[in-house]
Image (cartoon, rainbow, N blue to C red):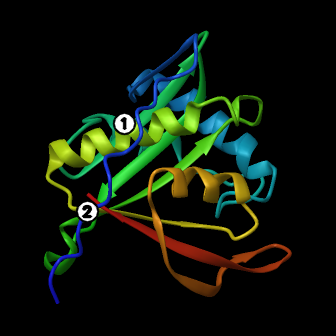
């Protein structure tokens, strides 16, 4: 099989006024984890639930080198507060090194204001810089705002993972989406 053709250029996306989108720094760890805990506590959008969180030390280690050919962590910051985070990582296997998977979270009070679009634009910039050919992600089917955002960036649905996430209330399907560059 030949490589599928890439999609159209991603839409231009500037952060909303007062928001800076940039590579994460060690000083962002506490703010990133706090924002992720808040989104996780909603129990609807992330695989983790409640106060479950990645240890700060592990996050600090990962972002110490911030923007590398293998991964990038990007934050959206407003008035000294982390209001969004995107992590994108190249797949490790030789057969999938051309693919990078991403995950994103935006603080509740900043959703629908362009933060997600600005973070995704940075993921595309990193992917071009790193030589990635395809971006991939998964999203819960009920997360209509995220599905609309990913479709705006020309991600295509590639399948459904039935009962892929086991949450405290039961199993959640995930929609797999991909975007060739």
Whether residue 136 is visible here, answered yes or no, is yes
- Give me the disc on residue 24: none
For residue 18, side relative to residue 128 (left or right): right
For residue 148, side relative to residue 66 (left or right): right
Above or below, 32 against 164 in this view is above
Above or below, 17 against 67 in this view is above
**Quarter of the image where one finds residue 109:** top right
Q: Position of residue 112 (x, y in %)?
A: 70, 36
Residue at the image point whose x is 21% and y is 52% from the top: 70
Front-most of residues 145 and 152: 152
Residue at the image point whose x is 16% and y is 48% from the top: 130
Mark 2 highlights which residue?
A: 6
Front-most of residues 95 and 38: 95
Residue at the image point whose x is 17% and y is 90% from the top: 1
**Quarter of the image where one finds residue 38:** top right
The answer for how far apart the CA atoms under marks 2 and 1 are is 18 Å
Secondary element under disc 1, as helix, strand or loop, is helix
For residue 15, side relative to residue 93 (left or right): right
Mark 1 highlights which residue?
A: 122
Q: Position of residue 146 (x, y in %)?
A: 63, 54
Q: Quadrant of the C terminus?
A: bottom left
């Amino acid at each position: 099989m030949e490589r599928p053709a890439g999609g159209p250029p991603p839409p231009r996306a500037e952060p909303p006024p007062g928001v800076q989108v940039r590579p994460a720094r060690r000083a962002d760890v506490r703010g990133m984890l706090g924002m992720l805990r808040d989104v996780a506590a909603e129990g609807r959008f992330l695989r983790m639930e409640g106060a479950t969180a990645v240890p700060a030390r592990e996050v600090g280690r990962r972002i110490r080198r911030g923007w590398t050919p293998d991964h990038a962590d990007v934050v959206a910051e407003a008035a000294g507060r982390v209001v969004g985070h995107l992590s994108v990582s190249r797949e490790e296997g030789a057969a999938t090194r051309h693919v990078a998977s991403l995950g994103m979270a935006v603080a509740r009070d900043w959703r629908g204001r362009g933060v997600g679009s600005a973070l995704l634009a940075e993921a595309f910039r990193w992917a071009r810089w790193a030589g990635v050919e395809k971006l991939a992600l998964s999203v819960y089917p009920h997360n209509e705002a995220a599905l609309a955002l990913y479709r705006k960036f020309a991600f295509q649905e590639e399948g459904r993972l039935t009962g892929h996430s086991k949450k405290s209330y039961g199993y959640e399907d995930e929609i797999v989406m991909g975007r060739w560059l």
